[in-house]
Image (cartoon, rainbow, N blue to C red):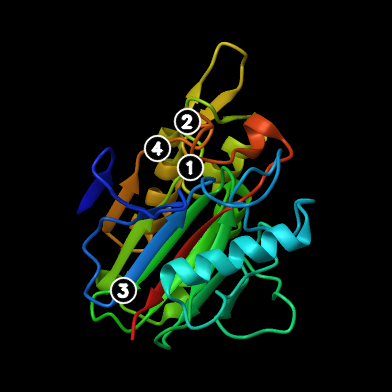
Amino acid sequence: MDEHEQNVVMKRNRVPDSTELIEAVWSAPAGVRAVVTTRKGGVSEPPFASFNLAEHVGDARQAVHANRQRLRKLLNLEGQPCWLAQVHGAEVVMAGNYVEPPVADASISRERGRVCAVLTADCLPVLLCNRTGNCVAAAHAGWRGLAAGVIEATLAAMETSADEVLAWLGPAIGPAAYEVGDEVRARFIEADEHSAAAFQANERGRWQADLYALASIRLRAADVSNITRFRHCTYAEPERFYSHRRDGRCGRMAALIWLER
């Protein structure tokens, strides 16, 4: 198993206006760019302060638009990323220019300059590419999406041999903060008994779930072994990350991947 951890060592792109972007540190080939935003450096007001990129959370539309334009400028993107209407499912679309965001939880791209994006605030963003650097994908993987098979559906849509796939698991809620009930654990174990290792019993008779471990188990079951895990908990770092479980009403970060021209 070729599994790595991106912990304290990470590239930070700090720009003069205080916006902070975290670049994935992994073994992706040249020309593949993968970035995660933080909550820092936008124009949204509390409780969405400040770099919220989601339109569906109740933030002022003009603030979201300004933040998205700022992101496009910071990353020198040719157009807006392919934003999705996420529903915690397993639908995968080809990244493109849509009049309305497609209802999906993952997108893929083989076109240079076309950006795949998912929005998160505790759920796990899974960014994927192949070793030859001609296909990328982004998946939104909370527990429902993982259980529904969003990783498997995204890998199938990539049409790439599993041993050619590289995965980067971005910032998500950590197991110390993520409590779930018996029904969640049972659903995963029913599909794969190895998933039991991703749940630890707590004193309340419930379970602490490790989304990173669950995603890694799904990836390895699909024969993807090159996995890099970002070890920062969204719940535990309120100054940097949005967390729906911690804050309730809040903004969303974006995880983006694309093939540079």
Residue, x 54% and y 65% (percent of image)?
A: 70
Q: Quadrant of residue 178?
A: top right
Residue, x 43% and y 88% (percent of image)?
A: 111
Image spot of residue 162 (x, y percent)? 31, 71
User: Which amino acid type corresponds to the residue marked 2 in the rendered image?
Assistant: Pro
Tell me the residue that label 4 is attached to: 232
Distance CA(mark 3)–CA(mark 2): 30 Å
Camera-side mark, 4 or 1: 4
Image spot of residue 114 (x, y percent)? 47, 82
Image spot of residue 132 (x, y percent)? 24, 81
Residue, x 56% and y 42% (percent of image)?
A: 122
Query: Badge 3: few (under 14), some or many (20 or more) residues near its Cα, within 10 Å?
Result: many
For the residue labelled by badge 1, is the local secondary structure a helix, a strand or a loop?
Answer: helix
For the residue labelled by badge 2, is the local secondary structure a helix, a strand or a loop?
Answer: loop
Query: Badge 1: few (under 14), some or many (20 or more) residues near its Cα, within 10 Å?
Result: many
Tell me the residue that label 3 is attached to: 32
Front in this rendered view, residue 258 or 43: 43
Residue furthest to the top? 203
Label 3 or label 1, whichever comes before in sequence order:
3
Examine the rendering and report whether any part of residue 58 can be seen. Answer: yes
Distance CA(mark 3)–CA(mark 1): 25 Å
Tell me the residue that label 1 is attached to: 211
In the rendered structure, are the residues bearing label 2 and label 1 in contact, judged by CB atoms less than 8 Å apart? yes
Tell me the residue that label 2 is attached to: 175
